[in-house]
Image (cartoon, helix red, strand yellow):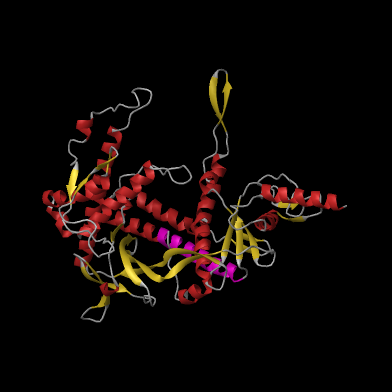
Amino acid sequence: MRFSTNKSCAFSIHTLYLRKVEKRKISLQLTYKYKLKPTRPQAVTISTHLELCRRQYNYRLSERFKWWEATRTPINTCPLNASIVSVEEIYKNIPLTRVQTRDGRKKDEAGNPITRKGDIFSNIDGGYVQWQTVQLADLKNTKKLFPDYKKLDAQVLQDVVNRVETSFSNFTILDKNGRRRGKPRFKGFHYYKSFTYPQLDNLNIIKDEQSRICIDLAKIGQVPMAFHRPIPKGFKVKTGTVIREADGWYISLTLEDKTVPVTVAEIQPTAENCLGIDLGITNYLYLSNGERVENPRFLRRSSEKLAKLQARLAKRVKGSKSWKIIKDKISKLHQFVARTRLDFQFKTAHKLFNKCDVLVLEDLSLKNLTRRAQVKTDIEDGNLVYLPNGQAAKSGLNKSMLDAAHGQFATVIKYVAGKLGKSVVFVDPKGTSQHCWNCLNKVPKELSERWHSCQCGEELERDENSAKLIKKIGLNYESGGGSTSLKKALANREKEACSLTILR
Protein backbone atom coordinates (compact mmCIF):
# COMPACT_ATOMS: atom_id res chain seq x y z
CA MET A 1 0.00 0.00 0.00
CA ARG A 2 1.28 3.48 -0.82
CA PHE A 3 0.29 6.57 1.08
CA SER A 4 0.16 10.14 -0.17
CA THR A 5 2.90 12.53 0.91
CA ASN A 6 2.90 16.24 1.57
CA LYS A 7 4.83 19.03 -0.17
CA SER A 8 7.86 18.55 2.05
CA CYS A 9 9.01 15.57 -0.03
CA ALA A 10 11.80 17.64 -1.63
CA PHE A 11 13.35 18.24 1.80
CA SER A 12 12.83 14.59 2.72
CA ILE A 13 14.65 13.38 -0.38
CA HIS A 14 17.75 15.46 0.49
CA THR A 15 17.58 14.24 4.08
CA LEU A 16 17.96 10.65 2.91
CA TYR A 17 21.48 11.37 1.62
CA LEU A 18 22.70 12.82 4.91
CA ARG A 19 22.60 9.37 6.53
CA LYS A 20 24.29 6.05 5.99
CA VAL A 21 22.02 4.40 3.41
CA GLU A 22 21.82 1.38 1.18
CA LYS A 23 21.03 2.41 -2.40
CA ARG A 24 18.87 0.31 -4.70
CA LYS A 25 18.40 0.62 -8.45
CA ILE A 26 14.75 1.56 -8.06
CA SER A 27 13.43 5.01 -8.93
CA LEU A 28 11.42 6.96 -6.38
CA GLN A 29 7.65 6.67 -6.68
CA LEU A 30 4.89 8.63 -4.98
CA THR A 31 1.11 8.37 -5.10
CA TYR A 32 -1.09 11.47 -5.11
CA LYS A 33 -4.84 11.18 -4.80
CA TYR A 34 -7.26 13.76 -6.22
CA LYS A 35 -11.04 14.05 -6.11
CA LEU A 36 -12.78 13.95 -9.48
CA LYS A 37 -15.76 16.17 -10.24
CA PRO A 38 -17.31 14.53 -13.30
CA THR A 39 -20.44 15.80 -15.02
CA ARG A 40 -23.50 13.58 -14.90
CA PRO A 41 -22.86 12.01 -18.33
CA GLN A 42 -19.21 11.42 -17.36
CA ALA A 43 -20.23 9.84 -14.04
CA VAL A 44 -22.57 7.45 -15.92
CA THR A 45 -19.75 6.57 -18.34
CA ILE A 46 -17.28 5.92 -15.50
CA SER A 47 -19.83 3.70 -13.73
CA THR A 48 -20.44 1.79 -16.97
CA HIS A 49 -16.70 1.25 -17.51
CA LEU A 50 -16.28 0.00 -13.94
CA GLU A 51 -19.13 -2.49 -14.34
CA LEU A 52 -17.68 -3.80 -17.63
CA CYS A 53 -14.30 -4.26 -15.93
CA ARG A 54 -15.95 -6.15 -13.07
CA ARG A 55 -17.75 -8.53 -15.43
CA GLN A 56 -14.59 -9.14 -17.43
CA TYR A 57 -12.62 -9.81 -14.23
CA ASN A 58 -15.13 -12.43 -13.07
CA TYR A 59 -15.23 -14.10 -16.50
CA ARG A 60 -11.44 -14.30 -16.83
CA LEU A 61 -11.15 -15.58 -13.26
CA SER A 62 -13.70 -18.31 -14.00
CA GLU A 63 -11.59 -19.36 -17.01
CA ARG A 64 -8.55 -19.70 -14.81
CA PHE A 65 -10.47 -21.76 -12.24
CA LYS A 66 -11.85 -24.12 -14.89
CA TRP A 67 -8.39 -24.92 -16.25
CA TRP A 68 -6.83 -25.11 -12.77
CA GLU A 69 -9.47 -27.53 -11.49
CA ALA A 70 -9.30 -29.64 -14.66
CA THR A 71 -5.55 -30.18 -14.33
CA ARG A 72 -5.47 -30.96 -10.61
CA THR A 73 -5.12 -34.66 -9.72
CA PRO A 74 -5.78 -35.93 -6.17
CA ILE A 75 -2.85 -38.06 -5.03
CA ASN A 76 -5.08 -40.61 -3.30
CA THR A 77 -7.15 -41.42 -6.40
CA CYS A 78 -4.93 -41.19 -9.48
CA PRO A 79 -1.26 -41.72 -10.41
CA LEU A 80 0.89 -38.60 -10.24
CA ASN A 81 1.61 -38.70 -13.98
CA ALA A 82 -2.08 -38.82 -14.97
CA SER A 83 -4.82 -36.20 -15.26
CA ILE A 84 -8.52 -36.36 -14.47
CA VAL A 85 -9.33 -34.77 -17.84
CA SER A 86 -7.70 -35.79 -21.11
CA VAL A 87 -5.05 -33.50 -22.56
CA GLU A 88 -7.08 -33.02 -25.75
CA GLU A 89 -10.08 -31.87 -23.73
CA ILE A 90 -8.02 -29.42 -21.62
CA TYR A 91 -6.44 -27.70 -24.63
CA LYS A 92 -9.52 -27.90 -26.88
CA ASN A 93 -10.29 -24.16 -26.95
CA ILE A 94 -6.75 -22.90 -26.36
CA PRO A 95 -4.64 -21.84 -29.39
CA LEU A 96 -1.25 -23.52 -29.18
CA THR A 97 0.56 -20.61 -30.86
CA ARG A 98 0.19 -16.89 -31.30
CA VAL A 99 1.37 -14.56 -34.09
CA GLN A 100 2.85 -11.16 -33.21
CA THR A 101 0.87 -8.36 -34.86
CA ARG A 102 3.54 -5.62 -34.69
CA ASP A 103 7.20 -5.03 -34.00
CA GLY A 104 8.17 -5.29 -30.35
CA ARG A 105 9.10 -2.24 -28.29
CA LYS A 106 12.30 -3.75 -26.88
CA LYS A 107 15.31 -3.20 -29.12
CA ASP A 108 18.82 -4.59 -29.33
CA GLU A 109 22.08 -2.61 -29.24
CA ALA A 110 21.77 -1.74 -32.94
CA GLY A 111 18.29 -0.27 -32.36
CA ASN A 112 16.41 -3.07 -34.15
CA PRO A 113 13.30 -4.65 -32.58
CA ILE A 114 14.05 -7.92 -30.78
CA THR A 115 10.70 -9.37 -31.87
CA ARG A 116 9.09 -8.55 -35.20
CA LYS A 117 5.67 -8.62 -36.80
CA GLY A 118 4.76 -12.12 -37.92
CA ASP A 119 6.90 -13.98 -35.36
CA ILE A 120 5.22 -17.12 -34.01
CA PHE A 121 5.36 -17.99 -30.31
CA SER A 122 4.02 -20.93 -28.32
CA ASN A 123 1.26 -20.40 -25.77
CA ILE A 124 2.39 -23.45 -23.78
CA ASP A 125 5.65 -23.43 -21.88
CA GLY A 126 6.79 -26.61 -20.12
CA GLY A 127 3.29 -28.05 -20.26
CA TYR A 128 1.75 -24.97 -18.64
CA VAL A 129 -0.60 -22.63 -20.49
CA GLN A 130 0.53 -19.01 -20.55
CA TRP A 131 -2.91 -17.87 -19.49
CA GLN A 132 -2.15 -14.19 -19.28
CA THR A 133 -1.02 -14.14 -22.91
CA VAL A 134 -3.96 -16.28 -24.06
CA GLN A 135 -6.51 -14.10 -22.30
CA LEU A 136 -4.96 -10.87 -23.55
CA ALA A 137 -5.13 -12.19 -27.13
CA ASP A 138 -8.76 -13.24 -26.60
CA LEU A 139 -9.87 -9.67 -25.83
CA LYS A 140 -10.40 -9.11 -29.58
CA ASN A 141 -13.02 -11.85 -29.61
CA THR A 142 -14.62 -10.34 -26.52
CA LYS A 143 -15.12 -7.03 -28.33
CA LYS A 144 -16.64 -8.84 -31.32
CA LEU A 145 -19.08 -10.82 -29.19
CA PHE A 146 -19.89 -7.92 -26.83
CA PRO A 147 -19.69 -4.55 -28.66
CA ASP A 148 -20.09 -2.67 -25.33
CA TYR A 149 -16.43 -3.40 -24.60
CA LYS A 150 -15.42 -1.28 -27.60
CA LYS A 151 -16.40 1.74 -25.50
CA LEU A 152 -13.70 0.77 -22.98
CA ASP A 153 -10.07 1.82 -23.43
CA ALA A 154 -7.92 -1.14 -24.61
CA GLN A 155 -5.27 -0.64 -21.94
CA VAL A 156 -7.89 -0.52 -19.18
CA LEU A 157 -9.28 -3.84 -20.42
CA GLN A 158 -5.79 -5.36 -20.57
CA ASP A 159 -5.15 -4.26 -16.99
CA VAL A 160 -8.17 -6.33 -15.88
CA VAL A 161 -6.46 -9.47 -17.22
CA ASN A 162 -3.24 -8.44 -15.48
CA ARG A 163 -5.16 -8.16 -12.19
CA VAL A 164 -6.50 -11.68 -12.65
CA GLU A 165 -2.95 -12.91 -13.32
CA THR A 166 -1.65 -11.24 -10.17
CA SER A 167 -4.40 -12.55 -7.87
CA PHE A 168 -4.22 -16.08 -9.30
CA SER A 169 -0.41 -16.21 -9.18
CA ASN A 170 -0.49 -15.18 -5.52
CA PHE A 171 -2.86 -18.10 -4.92
CA THR A 172 -0.95 -20.80 -6.82
CA ILE A 173 2.70 -19.76 -6.39
CA LEU A 174 4.47 -19.81 -3.03
CA ASP A 175 6.16 -16.61 -1.85
CA LYS A 176 9.66 -16.34 -0.38
CA ASN A 177 8.34 -17.55 3.00
CA GLY A 178 6.78 -20.67 1.50
CA ARG A 179 3.24 -19.35 1.85
CA ARG A 180 0.52 -18.45 -0.58
CA ARG A 181 -2.48 -16.17 -0.37
CA GLY A 182 -6.11 -17.18 -0.23
CA LYS A 183 -8.26 -18.27 -3.13
CA PRO A 184 -9.32 -15.32 -5.35
CA ARG A 185 -12.98 -14.38 -5.06
CA PHE A 186 -15.45 -13.29 -7.66
CA LYS A 187 -16.23 -9.60 -7.25
CA GLY A 188 -19.73 -8.38 -6.49
CA PHE A 189 -20.89 -4.87 -7.38
CA HIS A 190 -19.67 -3.33 -4.13
CA TYR A 191 -16.30 -5.13 -4.13
CA TYR A 192 -14.85 -4.05 -7.47
CA LYS A 193 -14.15 -0.36 -6.99
CA SER A 194 -11.45 0.73 -9.45
CA PHE A 195 -9.98 0.49 -12.94
CA THR A 196 -6.52 1.57 -14.07
CA TYR A 197 -5.00 3.47 -16.98
CA PRO A 198 -1.49 1.92 -17.15
CA GLN A 199 -0.03 4.70 -19.28
CA LEU A 200 -0.72 8.33 -18.43
CA ASP A 201 1.47 11.39 -18.76
CA ASN A 202 1.80 14.90 -17.35
CA LEU A 203 0.16 16.09 -20.58
CA ASN A 204 -3.06 14.38 -19.47
CA ILE A 205 -3.46 17.08 -16.80
CA ILE A 206 -4.81 20.09 -18.71
CA LYS A 207 -7.09 23.12 -18.41
CA ASP A 208 -10.44 23.14 -20.17
CA GLU A 209 -12.25 26.07 -21.77
CA GLN A 210 -13.54 27.17 -18.36
CA SER A 211 -9.98 27.24 -16.93
CA ARG A 212 -10.72 24.19 -14.75
CA ILE A 213 -7.91 21.70 -14.23
CA CYS A 214 -8.96 18.36 -15.71
CA ILE A 215 -7.54 14.90 -16.26
CA ASP A 216 -7.93 13.66 -19.83
CA LEU A 217 -9.03 10.01 -19.70
CA ALA A 218 -9.40 7.92 -22.85
CA LYS A 219 -13.01 7.11 -23.85
CA ILE A 220 -14.27 9.36 -21.01
CA GLY A 221 -12.97 12.84 -21.81
CA GLN A 222 -11.68 15.75 -19.77
CA VAL A 223 -12.86 15.14 -16.21
CA PRO A 224 -12.59 18.12 -13.80
CA MET A 225 -10.58 17.42 -10.66
CA ALA A 226 -9.75 19.13 -7.36
CA PHE A 227 -6.05 19.74 -8.07
CA HIS A 228 -5.23 20.64 -4.47
CA ARG A 229 -1.46 20.13 -4.81
CA PRO A 230 0.84 20.30 -7.85
CA ILE A 231 2.98 17.50 -9.22
CA PRO A 232 6.47 17.82 -7.64
CA LYS A 233 9.19 19.08 -9.91
CA GLY A 234 10.99 16.26 -11.70
CA PHE A 235 8.18 13.73 -11.24
CA LYS A 236 6.22 12.29 -14.15
CA VAL A 237 2.76 10.77 -14.10
CA LYS A 238 2.96 7.03 -14.87
CA THR A 239 -0.44 5.49 -14.15
CA GLY A 240 -3.86 6.55 -12.95
CA THR A 241 -6.45 4.50 -11.06
CA VAL A 242 -10.06 5.71 -10.99
CA ILE A 243 -11.59 4.74 -7.63
CA ARG A 244 -15.21 4.73 -6.44
CA GLU A 245 -15.63 5.78 -2.82
CA ALA A 246 -18.60 6.61 -0.63
CA ASP A 247 -18.48 10.33 -1.39
CA GLY A 248 -17.71 10.19 -5.10
CA TRP A 249 -14.96 9.41 -7.59
CA TYR A 250 -11.22 9.80 -7.06
CA ILE A 251 -8.12 9.25 -9.15
CA SER A 252 -4.86 7.97 -7.70
CA LEU A 253 -1.84 9.04 -9.78
CA THR A 254 1.45 7.17 -9.53
CA LEU A 255 4.37 9.58 -9.94
CA GLU A 256 7.96 8.62 -10.70
CA ASP A 257 11.32 10.39 -10.72
CA LYS A 258 13.99 8.16 -12.26
CA THR A 259 16.81 10.49 -11.21
CA VAL A 260 16.16 9.87 -7.49
CA PRO A 261 16.92 6.31 -6.31
CA VAL A 262 14.96 4.67 -3.52
CA THR A 263 17.04 4.67 -0.34
CA VAL A 264 16.72 2.75 2.90
CA ALA A 265 18.30 4.27 6.00
CA GLU A 266 20.45 1.97 8.13
CA ILE A 267 20.89 3.62 11.53
CA GLN A 268 22.31 1.62 14.41
CA PRO A 269 20.02 2.00 17.46
CA THR A 270 21.62 3.52 20.56
CA ALA A 271 20.25 4.46 23.97
CA GLU A 272 20.14 8.13 22.88
CA ASN A 273 18.73 7.98 19.33
CA CYS A 274 15.88 5.45 19.70
CA LEU A 275 12.55 4.96 21.44
CA GLY A 276 10.73 1.74 22.27
CA ILE A 277 6.99 1.54 21.57
CA ASP A 278 4.44 -0.76 23.16
CA LEU A 279 1.22 -0.93 21.14
CA GLY A 280 -1.91 -1.45 23.16
CA ILE A 281 -5.64 -0.90 23.56
CA THR A 282 -5.93 1.13 26.79
CA ASN A 283 -3.07 3.33 25.63
CA TYR A 284 -2.58 3.44 21.88
CA LEU A 285 1.17 3.89 22.44
CA TYR A 286 3.38 3.75 25.49
CA LEU A 287 6.91 5.06 24.94
CA SER A 288 10.04 3.92 26.71
CA ASN A 289 10.59 7.49 27.98
CA GLY A 290 7.35 7.29 30.01
CA GLU A 291 5.12 9.22 27.58
CA ARG A 292 1.85 7.78 26.36
CA VAL A 293 -0.70 8.39 23.61
CA GLU A 294 -4.35 7.79 24.44
CA ASN A 295 -6.35 5.47 22.21
CA PRO A 296 -8.77 7.63 20.13
CA ARG A 297 -11.19 4.69 19.59
CA PHE A 298 -12.60 6.17 16.38
CA LEU A 299 -15.02 3.32 15.64
CA ARG A 300 -16.17 3.06 19.27
CA ARG A 301 -16.97 6.78 19.35
CA SER A 302 -19.11 6.42 16.21
CA SER A 303 -20.72 3.13 17.24
CA GLU A 304 -23.87 4.71 18.72
CA LYS A 305 -24.56 6.73 15.57
CA LEU A 306 -23.74 3.71 13.43
CA ALA A 307 -26.13 1.49 15.42
CA LYS A 308 -29.00 3.97 14.95
CA LEU A 309 -28.42 4.12 11.19
CA GLN A 310 -28.29 0.33 10.93
CA ALA A 311 -31.51 0.03 12.93
CA ARG A 312 -33.21 2.46 10.53
CA LEU A 313 -31.80 0.55 7.57
CA ALA A 314 -33.28 -2.73 8.83
CA LYS A 315 -36.79 -1.19 8.74
CA ARG A 316 -36.52 -0.13 5.07
CA VAL A 317 -37.29 -2.25 2.03
CA LYS A 318 -34.01 -3.44 0.54
CA GLY A 319 -33.25 -1.60 -2.69
CA SER A 320 -35.77 1.20 -2.10
CA LYS A 321 -34.83 4.87 -2.38
CA SER A 322 -34.88 5.45 1.39
CA TRP A 323 -32.80 2.26 1.88
CA LYS A 324 -30.14 3.58 -0.50
CA ILE A 325 -30.05 6.97 1.27
CA ILE A 326 -29.41 5.37 4.68
CA LYS A 327 -26.93 2.95 3.11
CA ASP A 328 -24.94 5.92 1.73
CA LYS A 329 -24.93 7.55 5.16
CA ILE A 330 -23.51 4.38 6.72
CA SER A 331 -20.82 4.17 4.02
CA LYS A 332 -19.82 7.79 4.55
CA LEU A 333 -19.63 7.28 8.32
CA HIS A 334 -17.29 4.31 7.86
CA GLN A 335 -15.25 6.38 5.42
CA PHE A 336 -15.01 9.20 7.97
CA VAL A 337 -13.78 6.76 10.64
CA ALA A 338 -11.13 5.30 8.31
CA ARG A 339 -9.87 8.73 7.23
CA THR A 340 -9.65 10.17 10.73
CA ARG A 341 -7.79 7.06 11.89
CA LEU A 342 -5.27 7.31 9.05
CA ASP A 343 -4.79 11.04 9.62
CA PHE A 344 -4.16 10.41 13.33
CA GLN A 345 -1.60 7.71 12.51
CA PHE A 346 0.35 9.92 10.12
CA LYS A 347 0.46 12.83 12.56
CA THR A 348 1.50 10.51 15.41
CA ALA A 349 4.28 8.98 13.28
CA HIS A 350 5.71 12.41 12.44
CA LYS A 351 5.61 13.46 16.12
CA LEU A 352 7.45 10.29 17.15
CA PHE A 353 10.22 10.79 14.60
CA ASN A 354 10.66 14.38 15.78
CA LYS A 355 11.86 12.87 19.08
CA CYS A 356 14.25 10.20 17.75
CA ASP A 357 15.94 8.68 14.71
CA VAL A 358 14.99 5.04 15.33
CA LEU A 359 11.69 3.56 16.48
CA VAL A 360 11.61 0.05 17.94
CA LEU A 361 8.28 -1.78 18.01
CA GLU A 362 6.87 -5.29 18.06
CA ASP A 363 6.32 -7.28 14.89
CA LEU A 364 2.78 -8.27 15.82
CA SER A 365 0.82 -10.98 14.05
CA LEU A 366 -2.60 -9.33 14.17
CA LYS A 367 -4.22 -12.20 12.29
CA ASN A 368 -3.45 -14.50 15.19
CA LEU A 369 -4.29 -11.94 17.86
CA THR A 370 -7.79 -11.38 16.48
CA ARG A 371 -8.78 -15.03 16.08
CA ARG A 372 -11.86 -16.45 17.79
CA ALA A 373 -11.45 -18.04 21.20
CA GLN A 374 -10.77 -21.77 21.14
CA VAL A 375 -13.75 -24.05 21.68
CA LYS A 376 -13.88 -25.82 25.07
CA THR A 377 -15.76 -29.09 25.34
CA ASP A 378 -16.44 -31.82 27.90
CA ILE A 379 -18.27 -35.11 28.09
CA GLU A 380 -21.23 -35.33 30.47
CA ASP A 381 -23.37 -38.47 30.63
CA GLY A 382 -21.93 -39.57 27.30
CA ASN A 383 -22.88 -36.33 25.55
CA LEU A 384 -20.61 -33.65 24.15
CA VAL A 385 -21.08 -30.39 26.08
CA TYR A 386 -19.69 -26.99 25.04
CA LEU A 387 -18.22 -25.02 27.93
CA PRO A 388 -17.94 -21.22 28.27
CA ASN A 389 -14.79 -20.03 26.47
CA GLY A 390 -14.98 -16.26 26.92
CA GLN A 391 -15.86 -15.59 23.26
CA ALA A 392 -18.03 -12.57 24.12
CA ALA A 393 -15.11 -10.82 25.84
CA LYS A 394 -12.75 -11.92 23.05
CA SER A 395 -15.09 -10.44 20.43
CA GLY A 396 -14.96 -7.05 22.18
CA LEU A 397 -11.17 -7.25 22.42
CA ASN A 398 -10.90 -8.16 18.73
CA LYS A 399 -13.11 -5.22 17.79
CA SER A 400 -10.94 -2.83 19.80
CA MET A 401 -7.75 -4.20 18.23
CA LEU A 402 -9.14 -3.85 14.72
CA ASP A 403 -10.33 -0.34 15.58
CA ALA A 404 -6.79 0.58 16.66
CA ALA A 405 -5.42 -0.79 13.33
CA HIS A 406 -1.90 -1.40 14.61
CA GLY A 407 -0.97 -3.18 11.39
CA GLN A 408 -1.81 -0.10 9.35
CA PHE A 409 0.08 2.05 11.86
CA ALA A 410 3.22 -0.08 11.40
CA THR A 411 2.94 0.43 7.62
CA VAL A 412 2.57 4.20 8.13
CA ILE A 413 5.63 4.28 10.40
CA LYS A 414 7.74 2.47 7.77
CA TYR A 415 6.56 4.89 5.08
CA VAL A 416 7.23 8.01 7.16
CA ALA A 417 10.64 6.63 8.19
CA GLY A 418 11.64 6.17 4.55
CA LYS A 419 10.42 9.67 3.70
CA LEU A 420 12.36 11.30 6.55
CA GLY A 421 15.49 9.18 6.19
CA LYS A 422 15.02 7.51 9.56
CA SER A 423 14.81 3.89 10.61
CA VAL A 424 12.39 1.36 12.10
CA VAL A 425 13.41 -1.83 13.93
CA PHE A 426 10.90 -4.65 14.50
CA VAL A 427 11.46 -7.13 17.32
CA ASP A 428 9.92 -10.49 18.14
CA PRO A 429 6.97 -9.81 20.52
CA LYS A 430 7.39 -13.12 22.36
CA GLY A 431 7.93 -12.52 26.07
CA THR A 432 7.92 -8.71 25.94
CA SER A 433 5.05 -8.49 28.44
CA GLN A 434 6.24 -11.27 30.76
CA HIS A 435 9.83 -10.21 31.51
CA CYS A 436 11.37 -7.35 33.49
CA TRP A 437 13.16 -4.76 31.40
CA ASN A 438 15.82 -4.18 34.06
CA CYS A 439 16.94 -7.71 34.98
CA LEU A 440 15.25 -9.65 32.11
CA ASN A 441 13.83 -12.15 34.62
CA LYS A 442 10.41 -13.61 33.90
CA VAL A 443 7.50 -12.05 35.83
CA PRO A 444 4.28 -13.90 34.79
CA LYS A 445 1.18 -11.69 34.54
CA GLU A 446 -2.41 -12.21 33.45
CA LEU A 447 -3.88 -9.88 30.84
CA SER A 448 -5.95 -8.15 33.52
CA GLU A 449 -2.84 -7.33 35.60
CA ARG A 450 -1.71 -3.84 34.56
CA TRP A 451 1.13 -3.34 37.07
CA HIS A 452 4.65 -4.76 36.85
CA SER A 453 6.39 -5.67 40.10
CA CYS A 454 9.76 -7.47 40.02
CA GLN A 455 12.04 -8.87 42.73
CA CYS A 456 14.82 -6.61 41.47
CA GLY A 457 12.87 -3.60 42.78
CA GLU A 458 11.27 -2.36 39.53
CA GLU A 459 7.75 -1.04 40.10
CA LEU A 460 5.99 0.53 37.11
CA GLU A 461 3.05 0.15 34.72
CA ARG A 462 2.96 -2.99 32.64
CA ASP A 463 2.92 -1.11 29.30
CA GLU A 464 5.87 1.11 30.29
CA ASN A 465 7.87 -1.97 31.28
CA SER A 466 7.11 -3.55 27.89
CA ALA A 467 8.16 -0.37 26.04
CA LYS A 468 11.49 -0.22 27.89
CA LEU A 469 12.07 -3.93 27.29
CA ILE A 470 11.31 -3.52 23.57
CA LYS A 471 13.87 -0.73 23.39
CA LYS A 472 16.43 -2.86 25.22
CA ILE A 473 15.86 -5.72 22.78
CA GLY A 474 16.13 -3.31 19.84
CA LEU A 475 19.57 -2.16 21.00
CA ASN A 476 20.83 -5.68 20.13
CA TYR A 477 19.86 -5.15 16.49
CA GLU A 478 22.68 -5.44 13.97
CA SER A 479 22.41 -4.36 10.35
CA GLY A 480 21.89 -7.39 8.11
CA GLY A 481 21.58 -9.71 11.09
CA GLY A 482 17.83 -10.25 10.84
CA SER A 483 15.23 -9.34 13.45
CA THR A 484 16.17 -9.30 17.11
CA SER A 485 14.33 -10.93 20.02
CA LEU A 486 14.26 -11.39 23.78
CA LYS A 487 16.11 -14.69 23.28
CA LYS A 488 19.08 -12.80 21.82
CA ALA A 489 18.97 -10.28 24.66
CA LEU A 490 19.07 -13.10 27.22
CA ALA A 491 21.99 -14.71 25.35
CA ASN A 492 23.89 -11.41 25.41
CA ARG A 493 23.24 -11.12 29.16
CA GLU A 494 24.74 -14.57 29.71
CA LYS A 495 27.80 -13.66 27.63
CA GLU A 496 28.33 -10.50 29.66
CA ALA A 497 27.97 -12.48 32.92
CA CYS A 498 30.57 -15.01 31.71
CA SER A 499 32.96 -12.22 30.74
CA LEU A 500 32.68 -10.62 34.20
CA THR A 501 33.32 -14.01 35.84
CA ILE A 502 36.47 -14.55 33.76
CA LEU A 503 37.77 -11.04 34.57
CA ARG A 504 37.31 -11.66 38.26
Residue 471: quadrant of the picture: bottom right
Place of residue 129 in the rendered image (x, y in percent of width and height, measured from the top left): 26, 41
Q: Is residue 443 visible?
A: yes
Is residue 344 covered in magenta?
A: yes
The residue segment tinted magenta is 333-354
Task: Judge whether 447 appears above or below 255 on screen.
Answer: above
User: Looking at the image, which residue is at 59% across and 71% down?
Assistant: 354
Place of residue 89 in the rendered image (x, y in percent of width and height, measured from the top left): 20, 31
Residue 91: quadrant of the picture: top left
Most common secondary structure along the magenta stretch? helix
Q: Is residue 225 left or right of residue 20?
A: left
Q: Which is nearer the eye, 158 or 86?
A: 86
Q: Which is nearer the eye, 254 or 90?
A: 90
Place of residue 341 in the rendered image (x, y in percent of width and height, measured from the top left): 49, 62
User: Looking at the image, which residue is at 64% across and 64% down?
Assistant: 274
Q: Is residue 339 left or right of residue 195?
A: right
Q: Is residue 280 left or right of residue 255?
A: right
Q: Quadrant of the N terminus?
A: bottom left
Q: How many discs mark residues in the rendered view?
A: 0
Q: Is residue 183 left or right of residue 409?
A: left
